[in-house]
Amino acid sequence: MKDWQPLKFEELSEDTQQVLNILNQESDLACVLIGASYLAELLASTLKVAFIETRISQKILNPQNGAIGGFVTRADLAYCLGLIKKKAYNDLLKIAEIRNLFAHKHLKLDFGEANVRKACNELQSWRLILLGEEEELEIEATIEQMRVKARNQFNLSVVFLGTRIHLDALSKLERKKRME
């Protein structure tokens, strides 16, 4: 059996369209689990760029039993190393919270649940599309409209966070190559 390795950025770039399709077309559960998993892979790849080349980095990043294989642990370390900014870090923690809401519920959960909607509304990355304007409050929104809004907030946050993490890591990789 081949040792686990973080995906290369090129592979993650190629996966982006498939991730977007899942975020937009699959069930709410698949959307949350795949979105969080995608960000976890980006964090692993970002951390690997910051590490020296060694098999130990693969070992500690392994999601099954590595010391920094967990999503939140990776986010913590990426933030402490200055690889991601505070706003991105906070959104990653919120996405981990949303993922845990879904993963630890024995009955079906969706974006229409009040606690999920509240967590999605607390995400900041999606607000980029508002371009500084205030969000319009819909006083008479239906449960389905609120569910769709929460899912869109989650999806946009995953996409914007993923893009930001990807670009920052590529920039660091280029600087690392120039210093060699």
Image: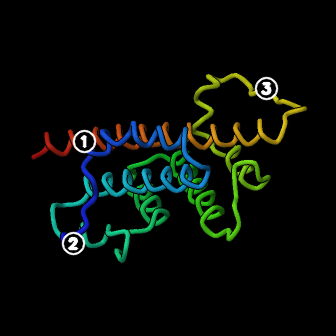
Foreground: 167 or 152? 152
Write down the residue under mark 3: 136
Spatial CA distance of label 3 from label 2 is 49 Å
- Sequence-earlier tag: 1 or 3: 1
- Sequence-earlier tag: 2 or 1: 1
Dividing the picture into quarters, in which one does residue 67 lie?
bottom left
The mark found on residue 10 in the picture is 1
Q: Amino acid at mark 1?
A: Glu
Q: Amino acid at mark 2?
A: Ile
Secondary structure at numbered mark 3: loop
Secondary structure at numbered mark 1: helix
Query: Would you place residue 153 above or below residue 117 in this image?
Result: above
Horizontal placement of 173 versus 109: left or right? left
- Sequence-earlier tag: 3 or 2: 2
Sort mark 1 into few (<14), some (14-19) or many (20+) by Cα contacts within 10 Å: few
Q: Which residue is pictured at 30% across the width and 72% down the height?
A: 60
Q: Amino acid at mark 3?
A: Glu
Residue 136 is situated, as x and y percent measured from the top left of the image, at 79, 26
Residue 100 is situated, as x and y percent measured from the top left of the image, at 61, 64
**Residue extending furthest left?**
180
Foreground: 167 or 175? 167
The mark found on residue 169 in the picture is none
